[in-house]
Image (cartoon, grey):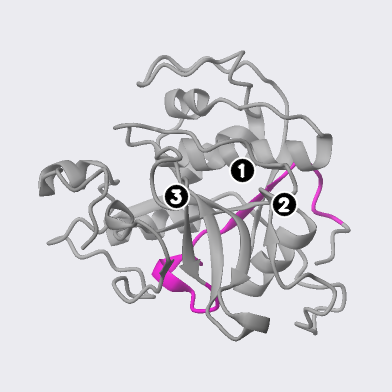
Amino acid sequence: MELTRFSDKSHEELTRRFDEISVDNFDTIESTTSRTSIPHYCNNETKDDDDIPDTVDLRLQGYVLPPRDMGDLDEHWAFSISSAMEIETAWHNLTYEYLSPQFLIDCTKNYQQAYNEMYYYGIPSEIDYPFKNGKGECKPVCKGRCLNDNYLSYEFLIKRTLALLGPVTIYFDGGDLPFYKQGIIDGSNCPRSFIPDPSTWRKPWSAVIIGYGNDGINGSGTDYWILRNSWGDSWGEEGYFRLIRGKEACGMMRLPIWPSLQEPNGICI
């Protein structure tokens, strides 16, 4: 087992770092999420990937700001979703600035509610709504519908979305992350069915997918996703980690969402 920034943490401290969400509560979150499915393909038949690249890394395209460190806060969704929106606005509006996780910390309680809040109020910039390293009073500063949240039902749709449209957030079993240093998380420690074991500290977590690739020559290795975490650039692979791709690993397909600044109508991926 590798030494990480969490190696000196007790079981109780690690448990507090993750949401206490039961299986029943998680199913409720999934069923009540306000989301729009985007068209699978224009003809809704082919899964041909010939028109998209074999690898994508949005960091190399200049859309991704340095990873943030959420410290000991519990609101991981606030950081993953605000990060995704930063990348989305950089991609489509060429606007490069940190957005406010503090707004989502103050005004929401979970991943699903954060998207619902942004649907109506958007998300302010870090300058307009500064980070306070704790929960405060909710003060919405944007009015009117500001984005769509689009649910992606298959992994190949996440791949195409990353290549053609923007980043994707996921809600998944993040129990491997405190011990992660480098490499590809293969999902062997977390069942695909995503049933957290209450006797362990394996708990839901949120991160943003910013790319994909393969660790072999000419695609002969393991397919993976590149994800940005919120524990600073000294954690993992300079603030990022890789998760095996094509296996629906660690329950990642429960709520993958592309937050878009545009209407989904007419978008064919």
Residue 26, image x and y in percent?
37, 56
Distance in Å between CA atoms under marks 1 and 3? 11 Å
Provide the residue designation for mark 1.
84
Q: In the picture, residue 159 is in which quadrant? A: bottom right
Q: In the picture, residue 168 is in which quadrant? A: bottom right
The residue nearer to you, when weighing 175 against 221, is 221
Disc on the earlier residue, 1 or 3: 1
Provide the residue designation for mark 2.
166
The residue nearer to you, when weighing 176 against 42, is 176
Residue 53, image x and y in percent?
77, 70
- Say what amino acid the circle numbered 3 marks: Ser
Distance in Å between CA atoms under marks 2 and 1? 8 Å
Q: Is mark 2 in CB contact (under 8 Å) with mark 1? A: yes
Q: Quadrant of the C terminus?
A: bottom right
Magenta residue check for 253: yes
Q: Residue at x 80, y 70 (%)?
A: 52
- Say what amino acid the circle numbered 1 marks: Ala
Magenta residue check for 48: no
Local crowd size for mark 3, using a 10 Å CA cut-off: few (<14), some (14–19), many (≥20):
many
Disc on the earlier residue, 2 or 1: 1
